[in-house]
Image (cartoon, grey):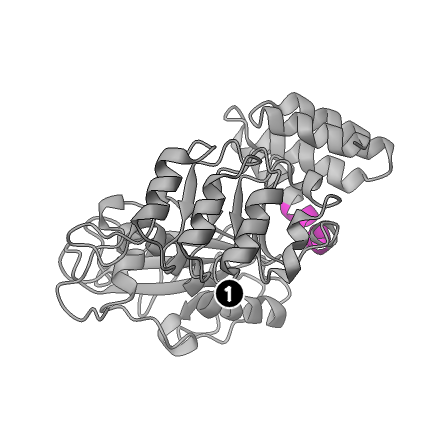
Amino acid sequence: MTEPERLLRAIAEDLYDDAPRLVYSDWLEEHGDLERAEFIRFQCELASANLSEERRHALRLRERALFDAHRQQWCQAFGLPIEEVHFERGSIARMRLSRWEGGHVLDPVCMPRLATLTELDLSGLRLGDDALGQFATAARLPSLRKLILSDNDVTDVGATTLASATGLPRLDTIYLFQNPIGEGARSALERGARFRLTTLDLGERADGYCMSPGEVEMARRQYLRTHVLPVVSHYFTTYERLRSAMLCVAQYWADEADDAVHGALIVSELPEPTLEGVGYGDDEDDESGVDPNVPNTRINSDYGESSSVVDLWGTVGRWDDNSGAIPLWAAFAPEGGSQEHGRLSEAYAPAVIFYRHGGYEILPRCRPHLDGVRPEWGWEE
């Protein structure tokens, strides 16, 4: 085991202890990787609850600058087709692969670098039983807690093999919906698995909901990847000063789950967008007439060149507020909020923040009980 692998293993043994991470950052600095060392230290400090707003803001700026500049390099070091990645306190935590590529993730050279990985998304890659069997036999991921295997042509054979995996000691959540899984495999995973399984999502839906919790989560991610991220990327490419964007949602009419949920995209030169002072429609929140998100950028928007508001209806063209958007986004809409409110900050609530490097962060839900609720009209299975 090399020294970096030993240090990553030490981090994985206690993911909540910063000491091993800081030792690793010292080793990186000693070996010339100053930016990665700095990134680890900044993210560790940002995890502290005892930071002043001024210090947190300064750290966030530097963290984003480092990740913008080095994300591609750091991802390429894994030798994997990484589509989405999230780092926590300097170490890789969550990862989605764009293709399986014969299981390179199981390469003995690669796997030790993934010792801190807590979530692996392999959804929609068509692994089948053989590839899942290979994964179950060879995977050595000591920190992995969530494994997403939806839509992968996995049958009871592959799922039962997964139950015998010995290299996933902390695994507690598996998504296996959109696979032909029967009761035998469910029983094997729930009763005989060699890990700490607490959540097995096979797509069962509670009364009044049109999706299971896992289905909602993955449908939301899919919508962001295929519909919103391309729009955000276009704006980032077109306007070089933009640094972030934010998807906001508002519930229309009365405060009921079966009402429409509207979406708006805010683009910004700030590390994180703001709703305060943003003009919306005929309203001008800021008396100076300058949108605080885009003081130096003239955006071609339906709301005028000085507005940071991007209309999802005209840009994306697939925001289905009367059915599809309700189970995915109603939980983010503020209680009592309505698109009829005069100010955008009163009508809308943030749901997702996007960053220039291509990543995004889904924010906490305002009313979790509305997540996945079936509309009383308009929904088609």
Q: Measured from the top left, where is residue 240 in percent x and y?
A: 64, 65
Q: Measured from the top left, where is residue 272 in percent x and y?
A: 51, 50
Q: Measured from the top left, where is residue 330 in percent x and y?
A: 26, 55
Tell me the residue that label 1 is attached to.
229
Q: Is residue 135 magenta?
A: no
Left or right placement of residue 68 versus residue 370 in this view: right
Question: Picture quarter containing residue 62?
Answer: top right
**The one of 233 and 91 positioned closer to us in this rendering:** 91
Q: What's the residue at 62%, 69% (across, down)?
A: 237
Question: Picture quarter containing residue 368?
Answer: top left
Q: Is residue 1 visible?
A: yes
Q: What's the residue at 56%, 57% (across, down)?
A: 269
Q: Measured from the top left, where is residue 310 in percent x and y?
A: 43, 69
Q: What's the residue at 49%, 64% (across, down)?
A: 225
**The one of 150 and 369 positioned closer to us in this rendering:** 150
Q: Classify the position of the C terminus by image quarter.
A: bottom left
Amino acid under disc 1: Leu
Give the magenta range.
64-72
Mark 1: secondary structure: helix
Left or right placement of residue 344 versus residue 101 in this view: left
Q: Could you classify mark 1 by the number of other residues whose Cα lies within 10 Å: few (under 14), some (14-19), or many (20 or more)? A: some
Left or right placement of residue 221 versus residue 73 in this view: left
